[in-house]
Image (cartoon, rainbow, N blue to C red):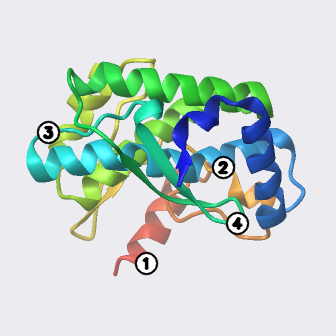
């Protein structure tokens, strides 16, 4: 397991984003940084949110308390926290998210506002998967940092996140834009989601 605090080590982070280039192609550093953060942010927010929903008490989201499962190709597949949070979750998540985002911006040149929007969508998705969407808006508000408000929409009876962020993976690979990508006309996004969700 790898200490999560290495995210703020610019040399380590530069290496990880370099490994992302092998997986996603020779995109520009800001695109690779955004793609990297899109996957990692979801992993980072999982331990405190999952424990909060399951037990009523959040695990500490501090980077110093967390470890990451990093594969040889640089992909980060899970995270764990070593302690229960002593304090409020919103400010604690603000500290860890802001430190990580500042590091990604410094190393890759990714846009800070885009990374903040990705953090909102990661939180919204994790809570959706646990059927705890009512927690999303008050939690994001308590985090602050100028995070956009989390939003959900109903598509054929299924709740989905109305994303505020784009992972930019379509700029790094030959893949098309994601079904819920906000960088497509709203009617196109709605039609693709309806088709996919029956």
Q: Tell me where residue 161 appears, x and y as whole percent.
A: 36, 52
* Mark closer to the observer (1, 2): 2
Residue located beneath label 3 in the image: 57
Q: Tell me where residue 88 appears, x and y as whole percent.
A: 21, 22
Give how far apart the Cα atoms at labels 3 and 4 are: 33 Å
Picture residue at 83% right of the left edge, 57% below the top: 21
Give how far apart the Cα atoms at labels 2 and 3 are: 29 Å
Mark toward the start of the polypeptide (4 vs 2): 2
Mark toward the start of the polypeptide (3 vs 1): 3
Q: Tell me where residue 90 appears, x and y as whole percent.
A: 29, 24
Q: Nearer the viewer, residue 83 or 52?
A: 83
Label ID, residue 135:
none
Give how far apart the Cα atoms at labels 3 and 1 are: 38 Å
Q: Quadrant of the C terminus?
A: bottom left
Label ID, residue 72:
4
What secondary structure is found at the residue carrying circle 3? loop
Mark toward the start of the polypeptide (1 vs 4): 4
Q: Nearer the viewer, residue 143 or 8?
A: 8
Residue located beneath label 2 in the image: 36
* Mark closer to the observer (1, 4): 4
* Mark closer to the observer (4, 2): 4
Can see residue 133? no
What secondary structure is found at the residue carrying circle 4? loop
Residue located beneath label 1 in the image: 195
* Mark closer to the observer (2, 3): 3
Sort mark 3 into few (<14), some (14-19) or many (20+) by Cα contacts within 10 Å.
some
């Amino acid at each position: 397991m790898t200490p999560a605090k290495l995210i703020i080590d610019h040399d380590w982070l530069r290496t990880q984003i370099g490994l992302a280039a092998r997986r996603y192609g020779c995109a520009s550093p800001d695109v690779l940084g955004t793609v990297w953060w899109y996957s990692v942010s979801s992993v980072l927010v999982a331990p405190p949110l999952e424990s909060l929903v399951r037990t009523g008490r959040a695990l500490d989201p501090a980077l110093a308390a967390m470890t990451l499962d990093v594969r040889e190709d640089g992909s980060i597949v899970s995270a764990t926290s070593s302690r229960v949070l002593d304090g409020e979750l919103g400010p604690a998540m603000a500290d860890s998210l802001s430190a990580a985002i500042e590091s990604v911006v410094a190393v890759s040149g990714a846009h800070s506002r885009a990374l903040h929007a990705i953090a909102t969508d990661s939180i919204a998705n994790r809570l959706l998967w646990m059927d705890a969407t009512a927690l999303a808006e008050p939690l994001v508000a308590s985090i602050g940092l100028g995070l956009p408000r989390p939003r959900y929409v109903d598509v054929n009876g299924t709740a989905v996140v109305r994303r505020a962020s784009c992972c930019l993976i379509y700029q790094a690979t030959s893949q098309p834009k994601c079904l819920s990508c906000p960088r497509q006309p709203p009617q196109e996004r709605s039609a693709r989601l309806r088709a996919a969700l029956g």
